[in-house]
Image (tube, rainbow, N blue to C red):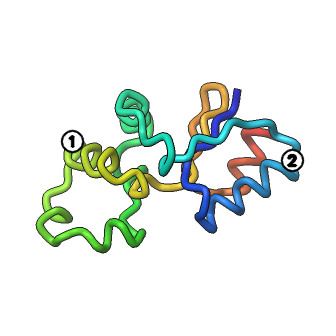
Amino acid sequence: MTTLYGIKNCDTMTKARAWLDAAGVTYQFHDYKLAGADPARLEAWVERAGWEMLLNRAGTTFRKLPDADKQGIDRDKAIALMLANPSMIKRPVIEVGDALLIGFKPDAYDSAFG
């Protein structure tokens, strides 16, 4: 089973969905705006990939945080920020079998689904 995690109205998500659809990949879509982020799943992703890989510091939501919230980020603070604001989770995140793909990287998609 392949699950695509993200936010519906995101340019990067649109690219990822188009790639998956063109490749004939069947997937479930988990929209953070509607369903939120699962704490246990996010913890597992952080264990596998690191919070630095998952926290979207380039996005509008992160940039709008008060400076105090942007300082001293560690694992626990990053997880709390991502749970409170799921749009801070880098997009997309794809779980396919044992693989975890973060961000839209066509080469990685080719390897995972090719």
Secondary structure of residue under mark 2: loop
Secondary structure of residue under mark 1: helix
Would you place residue 10 above or below residue 16 in this image? below
Dot 2 or dot 1, earlier in sequence: 2
Q: Tell me the quarter of the image containing the N terminus.
A: top right
Q: Residues within 10 Å of mark 1 (few under 14, many from 20)?
A: few
Q: Is residue 3 or residue 31 the one in the foreground?
A: 31
What x and y, as percent, mark residue 90?
47, 55
Q: Which quadrant of the structure image shows residue 83? A: top left
Would you place residue 37 above or below residue 17 in this image? above
- Could you tell whether 106 is left or right of 94 in the image? right
Q: Amino acid at mark 2?
A: Ala
Q: Amino acid at mark 1?
A: Asp
The residue at 66%/32% (across/down) is: 96
> Circle 1 sits on which residue?
76
> Circle 2 sits on which residue?
23
